[in-house]
Image (tube, helix red, strand yellow):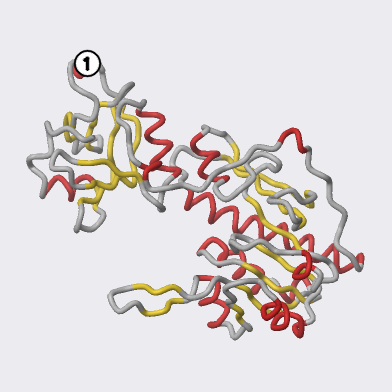
């Protein structure tokens, strides 16, 4: 069986890497790779391929980076003679003419228990909602967003230390394992295995995340702020403003276990103390104390709290906003 893989970010690279390594074991061939066009990065605006495209090029796989999935893209992909399209985090909608290039159709890895959390940010929403588990679904590609039949599902426990990055990386690997099973079973059957239609009534949707959504409101609880920091890491990364109105990124934090009586009089956002032994920079919130572990001032590198405090002697007593 021949497949075309479609994906762009680093998590999708993990899936492609696993599929590449398992081709012989599961009896398929990656005939080509679809990814987003290179983007200009760095001071000199050098065109840089996506992580998926970079890996594919390194391994000698044919790479296609069309701006649009139009007739020219279809003409480029058709000669590959692929049987199945496999997608994870590609970022484009596949129309009926494009899907018709693949006799077995297309399948998509989606990190949620579909039909819950359809859309582009399911992992972030699961963390924000305090879910205990993250679902991993392999669905058929359909003309409606994340509405295809479910072929296989699995899950992972969400730990308090998990971020969107760590959960996406796990989903990428586990999802690749499920994809290999589907390919093997479909190859033996001569057609894509049957899936289970989704329950439309149970569908919920996620939304595109903006930088403003990642701004910390210290009137919220320490628990909710911690969820946001984990959900929005690494992108766009949670942030707030210092007293000088310069932005401050916060990449890791936890709820501090401290007696609240001595901090009741302080305003939310006040930097209360620096605890070198138990770890963290303590900040008052609407409910509880936040212990900041990793942070970054404008124009500086991301630092752990100890290194940060070495150069921020005036930080204690200031009010973040």
Q: In the rendered image of this protein, does residue 163 appear above or below residue 5?
A: above
Q: How many marks?
A: 1
Considering every residue shown, the one lying at the far front of the view is 71
- The quarter of the image holding the C terminus is top left
Quarter residue 123 falls in? top right
- The quarter of the image holding the N terminus is bottom right
Depth check, front residue: 275 or 287? 287
Considering every residue shown, the one lying at the far top of the view is 261
Residue 199: x, y in percent? 78, 38
Q: Residue at x 22, y 45 (%)?
A: 305
Residue 279: x, y in percent? 25, 38
Left or right of 293 on screen, residue 309: left
Left or right of 312 on screen, residue 250: right
Depth check, front residue: 126 or 46? 46
Callout 1: 10 Å neighbours few (<14), some, many (20+)?
few
Q: Residue at x 43, y 36 (%)?
A: 227
Depth check, front residue: 198 or 234? 198
| Residue at numbered disc 1 | 264
Residue 162: x, y in percent? 47, 44
Considering every residue shown, the one lying at the far right of the view is 189
Give SS at disc 1.
Answer: loop
Residue 168: x, y in percent? 54, 53
Depth check, front residue: 313 or 82? 82
Considering every residue shown, the one lying at the far left of the view is 314
Left or right of 258 on screen, residue 52: right
Q: In the rendered image of this protein, does residue 211 appear above or below residue 71?
A: above
Q: In the rendered image of this protein, does residue 281 appear above or below residue 285?
A: below
């Amino acid at each position: 069986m021949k497949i075309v893989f479609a994906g762009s970010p680093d998590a999708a690279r993990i899936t492609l890497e696993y599929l590449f390594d398992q081709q012989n074991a599961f009896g398929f061939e990656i005939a080509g790779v679809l990814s987003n066009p290179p983007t200009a990065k760095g001071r000199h605006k050098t065109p840089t391929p996506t992580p998926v495209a970079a890996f594919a090029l390194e391994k000698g796989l044919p790479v296609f980076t069309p701006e649009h999935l139009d007739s020219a893209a279809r003409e480029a992909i058709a000669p590959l003679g692929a049987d199945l399209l496999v997608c994870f985090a590609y970022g484009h909608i596949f129309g009926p003419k494009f899907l018709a290039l693949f006799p077995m159709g297309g399948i998509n890895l989606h990190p949620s228990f579909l039909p819950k959390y359809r859309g582009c940010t399911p992992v972030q929403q699961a963390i924000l909602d305090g879910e205990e588990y993250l679902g991993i679904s392999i669905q058929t590609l359909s003309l409606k967003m994340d509405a295809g039949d479910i072929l296989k599902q699995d899950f992972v426990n969400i730990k308090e230390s998990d971020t969107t990055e760590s959960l996406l990386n796990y989903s990428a690997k586990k999802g690749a394992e499920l994809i290999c099973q589907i390919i093997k079973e479909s190859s033996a059957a001569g057609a894509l295995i049957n899936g289970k239609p989704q329950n439309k009534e149970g569908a919920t949707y996620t939304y595109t995340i903006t930088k403003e959504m990642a701004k910390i409101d210290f009137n919220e609880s320490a628990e909710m702020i911690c969820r946001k920091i984990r959900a929005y890491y690494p992108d766009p990364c949670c942030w707030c403003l210092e007293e000088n109105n310069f932005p401050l990124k916060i990449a890791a934090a936890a709820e501090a276990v401290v007696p609240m009586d001595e901090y009741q009089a302080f305003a939310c956002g006040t930097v209360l103390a620096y605890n070198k032994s138990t770890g963290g920079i303590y900040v008052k919130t609407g409910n509880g104390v936040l212990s900041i572990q990793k942070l970054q001032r404008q124009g500086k590198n991301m630092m752990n709290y100890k290194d940060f405090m070495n150069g921020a002697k005036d930080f204690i007593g200031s009010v973040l906003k």
